[in-house]
């Protein structure tokens, strides 16, 4: 089972390096290799996740290793689904390093499969946890698009049309990318919070406990709700939307990791 994880990691690293090389030399053969590596990595990674689920008897998302690994897989599948519908030039250059970084974090986390505590032995586990992590996957794509937008805008404002200007999509395309990713990620986040509340009622007798992770999930939700509200009512687009996508993703990462290791709570798997 571990070999599948290492094969996926190796494919992600190869894809990242290939995309970076392609970004520099614009060789389409290198781009084809990079795309093939991402698809291969997704296959190995999915097989690893399924094998771990079969071995543990539950959805593999209850430890730091499992959560980060599933997060990386969600970003990968989100990226591939996006690539299938839209064409955003050199998007993979900015997405694959994030996936590889997540996989390296998972690599150095404890791989042991632990028995689920009674509170987690519920059919709500795969529903709530998988939806919440998939939401973060699309928010990571919006974050990547935000970085690309700011880099491209900087080139244009300085009127120095260098490597980024010629390799990145137009500002309009990147703003649309941001909007599409948020349009998927935010509803998933909302469903994640709702399903978690229903599960909490079933497990603890109350819909909301103001546990640190619940609180930060709500804070993150309000950040993204404000982004979408301002987009459609105040005309927040382009630079503001890109910056807020980056800030929102930072909040999402703190909800995923920071809460576990700093604040603890009933949702924490830091120990």
Image: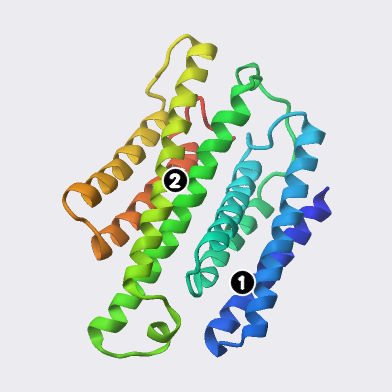
Q: Is residue 48 left or right of residue 26?
A: right
Q: Are marks 2 and 1 in contact (CB under 8 Å)?
A: no
Q: Position of residue 110 (x, y in %)?
A: 69, 44
Question: Nearer the observer, disc 2 or disc 1?
Answer: 2
When asked about the image quadrant of residue 59, the answer is top right
Coloring scheme used: rainbow
Disc 1 element: helix
- Kindly identify which residue carries mark 2: 185
Disc 2 element: helix
Q: Position of residue 224 (x, y in %)?
A: 32, 44
Residue 16: mark in rendering: 1
Q: Residues within 10 Å of mark 2 (few under 14, many from 20)?
A: many
Q: Residue at x 40, y 42 (%)?
A: 186
Q: Position of residue 241 (x, y in %)?
A: 28, 58
How far, Cα to Cα, is label 2 from label 1?
Answer: 24 Å
254 up-or-down from 156: above or below:
above
Q: Residue at x 53, y 82 (%)?
A: 23
Q: Is residue 175 left or right of residue 92?
A: left
Viewer-nearest residue: 57 or 225: 225
Q: Residues within 10 Å of mark 1 (few under 14, many from 20)?
A: many
Q: Position of residue 176 (x, y in %)?
A: 36, 61
């Amino acid at each position: 089972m571990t070999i599948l994880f290492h094969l996926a990691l190796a494919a992600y690293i190869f894809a990242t390096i290939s995309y970076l090389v392609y970004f520099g030399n614009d060789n389409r053969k290198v781009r084809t290799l990079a795309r093939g590596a991402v698809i291969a990595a997704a296959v190995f990674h999915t097989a690893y996740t399924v094998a771990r689920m079969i071995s543990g008897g539950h959805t593999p998302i209850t430890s730091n290793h499992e959560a980060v690994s599933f997060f990386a897989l969600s970003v990968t599948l989100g990226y591939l689904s996006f690539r299938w519908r839209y064409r955003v030039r050199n998007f993979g250059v900015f997405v694959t390093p994030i996936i590889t970084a997540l996989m390296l974090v998972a690599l150095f986390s404890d791989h042991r499969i632990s028995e689920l505590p009674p509170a987690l032995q519920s059919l709500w586990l795969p529903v709530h946890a998988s939806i919440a992590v998939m939401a973060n996957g699309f928010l990571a794509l919006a974050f990547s698009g935000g970085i690309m937008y700011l880099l491209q805008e900087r080139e244009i404002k300085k009127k120095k049309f260098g490597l980024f200007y010629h390799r990145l999509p137009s500002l309009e395309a990147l703003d649309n990318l941001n909007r599409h990713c948020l349009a998927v990620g935010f509803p998933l986040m909302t469903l994640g919070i709702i399903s978690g509340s229903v599960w909490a009622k079933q497990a603890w007798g109350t819909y909301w406990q103001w546990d640190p992770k619940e609180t930060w999930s709500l804070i993150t939700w309000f950040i993204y709700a404000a982004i979408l509200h301002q987009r459609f009512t105040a005309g927040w687009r382009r630079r503001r939307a890109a910056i807020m996508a980056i800030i929102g993703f930072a909040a999402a990462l703190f909800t995923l990791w920071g809460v576990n290791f700093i604040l603890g709570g009933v949702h924490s798997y830091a120990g």
